[in-house]
Image (spheres, rainbow, N blue to C red):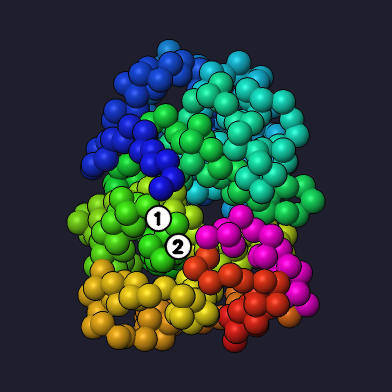
Amino acid sequence: MPTITYLTTIQFDFGAVKMLADEAKAVGITRPLLVTDKGVRDCGVLDRVLEQLPDAMRVSIFDGTPENPTENAVLDALSRYREGECDGMIAVGGGSPMDLAKGVAILAAHEPPLEQYAAIFGGAAKITNKIAPVIAVPTTAGTGSEVGRGAILTLNDGRKLGFSSPNNIPKRAICDPELTFGLPKRLTAATGMDAVSHCVETFISPVINPPAEGIAFEGLRRAMGHIERAVADGSDREARWEMMMAAMMGAMSFQKGLGAVHAISHPLGGMQEPRLHHGTLNAVVMPAVLRYNASHVGDKYDRLCDAMGLDRGTNLPAFIEGFNAKLKLPSNLREMGVPEAVVPVMAAAAELDHCNATNPRPATKDDYLVLINEAMG
């Protein structure tokens, strides 16, 4: 049985963002760096967050987070952090700003280079409790990074690596579903399927962790019961609340480990061109991986059907393909712009990804070659 740790303090409800100043005070942040992206800033959500901070508080802002956060962006934000003499961060946005903030938090208190803290290099043991404090304020319902111990960052050489440690977990998470009301339908669908993929992969992971498995099951039930409503009507309060809860629960289950879906989506998401959305990748790749894993999961697919409100024995890969189409997501990687030439490189990188170790069925580079080609369509 692995260590089970749920240590984040979470404020979750409509209007929770109003608690930001109190939470900053509680964790000792007096000069924050707000880490976000230009989309969050341009749509006015950042202003709504800033309104909750005292006028006298000295706030620095970094809004240069790319869609898939990079080592260069971490270093740029770190420079802003030091220029502002900051003592902590408030990450506002989706998974990218939150993961970027975690990368800055590591280097604010630890020696470079960033690479040495990656999970595949044994970096978890090097990330100490001296890490800078982070408050996470999600504005999407997908990654769950606000309660996760991991960050996915693309190094300057193109490798997309995971940085995982209990010390990475934000000191506070402020989950206010009202902040997701402005999300476009396509992004609501893609981030929602990200949450679904987290719940599915952690549930079928072979790691023994019944509490995490139970949370994944319940998160999946909530996600599948509300994602279509959230996409159809972005102001549906119940659907937005449930999707944010599902995203949070999916990330709480990460302690079981993910699998081949993420092992594939991580290197694909690290490409400079085309820029690919992580949640969309997970949705598109999931059917092929579900087919591959079917012989190694016992009765778990039937139990997934229970959570999803489907009849036992439902063909899950086919169902996910149809559900993606219903949400108007791409049907394959080729439609997303993935060129044929990169497939062998992506297959080799998937085998080395840290999520490969917890896939139910062992997968080699050759297996990933077949899986990615299948997902290409």
For disc 1, the marked residue is 208
Under circle 1, the secondary element is loop
Residue 206 numbered mark, or none: 2
Q: Is residue 37 visible?
A: no
**Picture quarter containing residue 87?**
top right
Asked if the residue under mark 1 is in contact with the one under mark 2, i.e. CB atoms within 8 Å, the reply is yes
Q: Position of residue 283 (x, y in %)?
A: 47, 71
Specify the principal SS of the magenta part. helix
User: Which segment is the magenta one?
Assistant: 341-358
Q: Quadrant of the C terminus?
A: bottom right
Q: Is residue 322 left or right of residue 103?
A: left
- Asked whether 354 or 39 is in front, the reply is 354
Q: Which residue is located at x 41 percent, y 66 percent?
A: 204
Q: Is residue 323 left or right of residue 65?
A: left
**Picture quarter containing residue 4?**
top left
Task: Tally the numbered discs.
Answer: 2
Residue 330 numbered mark, or none: none
Q: Position of residue 93 (x, y in %)?
A: 46, 44
Could you tell me the amino acid type at mark 2?
Pro
Q: Which residue is located at x 45 percent, y 57 percent?
A: 207
Q: Which residue is located at x 23 percent, y 42 percent?
A: 14
Under circle 2, the secondary element is loop
**Picture quarter containing residue 151?**
top right
Magenta stretch: includes residue 347? yes
Q: Position of residue 231 (x, y in %)?
A: 33, 67
Magenta stretch: includes residue 224? no
Q: Which residue is located at x 73 percent, y 80 percent?
A: 340
- Asked whether 259 or 74 is in front, the reply is 259
Q: Position of residue 55 (x, y in %)?
A: 40, 17
